[in-house]
Image (cartoon, rainbow, N blue to C red):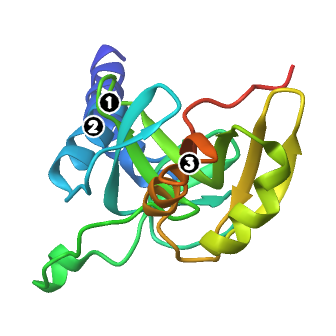
């Protein structure tokens, strides 16, 4: 009887780590950090008070959408490794920041997701439409009481570059792409 229990214990000890990688839950946190560190990253950009770098080959999709090897889950999103250029021998292009881009916080190492918005503090919120037209953006919402406007860019447009261009306008006090690192957990 003790031999049977020992066999089961050995099987569990040998197979359990392998089962963790085969399940659809993604990688363990240390493996996610190692993967992110091994992938090409784009130039630093600021979002609110944090500094981020986009990570090549990783994309975030709403759960149930997108395809690729699951890396991890973040709130209502799944982060996948899609279309590895490293496996094919091609050189990866420097990643930009588009809606659904996965970014890494330079200070904390936490992953975030570019939400597709650009937040701008304006000296005159009445200029939001003109700023949008001049920069190829769409106004999503103007919060006049706090002097902010929220813009979106066309699909595929680099949000960090668009925010930098927007910030150069004298009517704009600051502008940055939106990044979500944490998501509320419903009760």
Which residue is at a point 81% across and 27% down the rendered structure image? 146
Q: Earlier in the sequence, mark 1 or mark 2?
A: 2
Alpha carbon separation for disc pair 3 and 1: 34 Å
Which residue is at a point 31% across and 45% down the rendered structure image? 18
Q: Residue 56 carries which label?
A: none
Which of the pair 27/57 is nearer the observer? 57
Query: Which of label 3 and label 1 is nearer to you?
Result: 3
Q: Tell me residue 6's x, y (percent).
A: 28, 21
Quarter where residue 169 is shown: bottom right
Which of the pair 158/85 is nearer the observer? 158
Asked if residue 162 lies left or right of residue 31, the reply is: right
Residues at discs 3 and 1 in contact (Cβ within 8 Å): no
Whether residue 27 is visible here, answered yes or no, is no
Query: Which of label 1 and label 2 is nearer to you?
Result: 1
Indicate the quadrant containing the C terminus: top left, top right, bottom left or bottom right.
top right
Quarter where residue 37 is shown: top left
Q: Which mark is residue 170?
A: 3
Query: In the rendered image of this protein, does residue 63 appear above or below residue 113?
Result: below
Alpha carbon separation for disc pair 1 and 2: 8 Å
Residues at discs 1 and 2 in contact (Cβ within 8 Å): yes
Q: Is mark 2 on a helix, strand or loop?
A: helix
Q: Which of marks 3 and 1 is nearer the N terminus?
A: 1
Alpha carbon separation for disc pair 2 and 3: 40 Å
Indicate the quadrant containing the N terminus: top left, top right, bottom left or bottom right.
top left
Q: Tell me residue 186's x, y (percent).
A: 84, 25
Q: Residue 33 carries which label?
A: 2
Query: In the rendered image of this protein, does residue 36 appear above or below residue 4?
Result: below
Q: Tell me residue 170's x, y (percent).
A: 56, 48
Q: Is mark 3 on a helix, strand or loop?
A: loop
Asked if residue 73 lies left or right of residue 46, the reply is: right
Residue with the mark numbered 1: 109
């Amino acid at each position: 009887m003790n031999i049977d229990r020992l066999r089961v214990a050995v099987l569990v000890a040998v197979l359990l780590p392998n089962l963790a990688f085969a399940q659809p839950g993604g990688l363990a946190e240390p493996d996610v950090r190692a993967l992110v560190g091994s992938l090409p990253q784009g130039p630093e950009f600021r979002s609110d008070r944090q500094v981020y770098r986009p990570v090549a080959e990783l994309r975030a999709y709403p759960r149930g959408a997108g395809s690729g090897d699951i890396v991890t889950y973040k709130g209502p999103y799944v982060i996948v490794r899609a279309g590895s250029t490293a496996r094919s021998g091609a050189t990866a292009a420097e990643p930009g920041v588009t809606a659904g881009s996965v970014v890494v916080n330079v200070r904390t190492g936490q992953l975030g997701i570019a939400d597709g918005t650009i937040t701008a503090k304006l000296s005159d919120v009445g200029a939001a439409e003109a700023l949008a037209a001049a920069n190829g953006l769409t106004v999503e919402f103007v919060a006049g009481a706090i002097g902010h406007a929220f813009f979106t860019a066309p699909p595929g447009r680099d949000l960090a570059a668009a925010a930098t261009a927007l910030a150069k306008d004298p009517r704009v006090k600051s502008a940055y792409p939106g990044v979500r690192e944490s998501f509320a957990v419903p009760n």
